C-alpha cells in the first residue's frame, strides 16, 4: 500500500498532466523520494524541537544543596528533600533530648541529655552528639546519619576515645524522640553498655 501523501501527489500530477494534454513527464520515483525526504526532515525537526523543550524545562528551576534538574524536576542527594532540595533533614533533628540513661545492670542516671548539632560537611550525613550526665564530664561524639529523611534517621557513633574510654554505638533520632545504645570500653577493663531510650525533645 502506498503512502497517502504519494497517492495525493499522483492524483495532483494526473490533473496537471491533463492540462498539458498528456505531455507532462515527471518520474513517480522522484515524487516518492521527495515525499520520503520531507517526512525524514520533519522527523528530525521534531526531535530537535523536543530536545530543546526538555532542556528549557530546567531553565526556570533552581535546585539547591547539590540537587540536579532533570526534565523540570529536582533530584536531591541523600539527606536532602523538598521541591527545590531546600530541606536539609538533619536540621530537623538538631535539638536537645532529655531522659534516663541506664548503665547496664549497675544503675540509672536521671536528667541526662543528648544534643544533636549539625557540622559543616558537604554530604549532609554528619552530626556531633553531645552527652551530658550531671556529675560527669560532658562527652562529645561524632555520628554518621545512615538514612536521613523527613521522618528521621538511624545513626552510628564513630569510634571515639575520651580519656581512658572508647565509645561506639548506634541509635535513632526523628526530631521528637532520640534513642541510643552506647558501648563504653575502658582500655584495661570490661565494656559497659549505656542505654538511652525514648529521650524526649526539649
Image: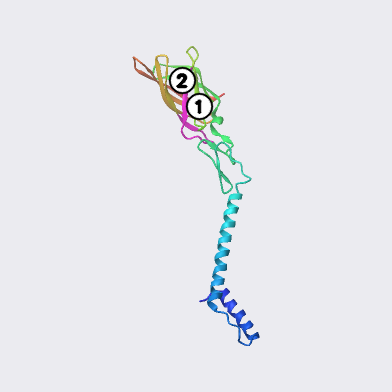
Q: Which mark is residue 101?
A: 2
Residue drawn at the location 65% of the way across and 85% of the way down? 19
Is residue 152 toward the left or the right of residue 192 in the image?
right
* Classed neighbour count for the residue bearing mark 1: other residues with Cα under 10 Å, few (<14), some (14–19), many (≥20): many
Mark 2, secondary structure of its residue: strand
Highlighted range, magenta:
139-155
How far across and down, in percent of the image, does residue 9 sit?
59, 77
- Measure the alpha-carbon separation of dots 2 and 1: 21 Å
- Magenta span has 152? yes
Q: Is residue 51 visible?
A: yes
Q: Which mark is residue 84?
A: none
How far across and down, in percent of the image, does residue 133 sit?
49, 16
Residue drawn at the location 59% of the way across and 53% of the way down? 52
**In the image, is residue 146 above or below residue 35?**
above
Is residue 36 toward the left or the right of residue 189 in the image?
right
Of the residues under marks 2 and 1, which one precedes in the sequence? Answer: 2
**In the image, is residue 146 above or below residue 49?**
above
Residue drawn at the location 42% of the way across and 25% of the way down? 169
Q: On the image, which quarter does residue 60 sit in?
A: top right
For the residues bearing labels 2 and 1, Cβ distance under 8 angstroms: no
Amino acid at each position: 500500500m502506498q503512502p497517502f501523501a504519494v497517492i495525493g501527489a499522483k492524483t495532483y500530477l494526473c490533473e496537471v498532466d491533463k492540462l498539458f494534454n498528456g505531455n507532462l513527464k515527471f518520474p513517480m520515483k522522484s515524487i516518492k523520494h521527495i515525499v520520503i525526504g520531507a517526512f525524514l526532515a520533519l522527523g528530525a525537526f521534531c526531535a530537535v524541537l523536543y530536545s530543546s523543550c526538555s532542556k528549557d524545562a530546567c531553565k526556570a528551576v533552581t535546585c539547591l544543596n547539590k540537587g540536579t534538574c532533570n526534565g523540570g524536576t529536582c533530584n536531591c542527594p541523600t539527606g536532602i528533600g523538598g521541591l527545590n532540595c531546600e530541606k536539609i533533614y538533619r536540621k530537623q533533628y538538631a535539638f536537645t533530648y532529655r531522659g534516663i540513661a541506664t548503665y547496664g545492670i549497675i544503675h540509672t542516671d536521671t536528667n541526662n541529655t543528648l544534643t544533636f548539632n549539625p557540622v559543616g560537611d558537604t554530604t549532609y550525613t554528619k552530626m556531633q552528639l553531645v552527652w551530658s550526665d550531671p556529675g560527669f564530664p560532658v562527652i562529645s561524639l561524632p555520628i554518621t546519619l545512615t538514612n536521613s529523611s523527613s521522618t528521621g534517621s538511624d545513626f552510628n557513633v564513630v569510634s571515639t576515645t575520651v580519656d581512658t574510654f572508647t565509645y561506639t554505638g548506634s541509635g535513632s533520632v526523628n526530631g521528637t524522640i532520640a534513642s541510643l545504645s552506647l558501648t563504653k570500653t575502658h582500655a584495661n577493663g570490661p565494656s559497659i553498655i549505656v542505654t538511652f531510650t525514648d529521650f524526649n525533645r526539649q
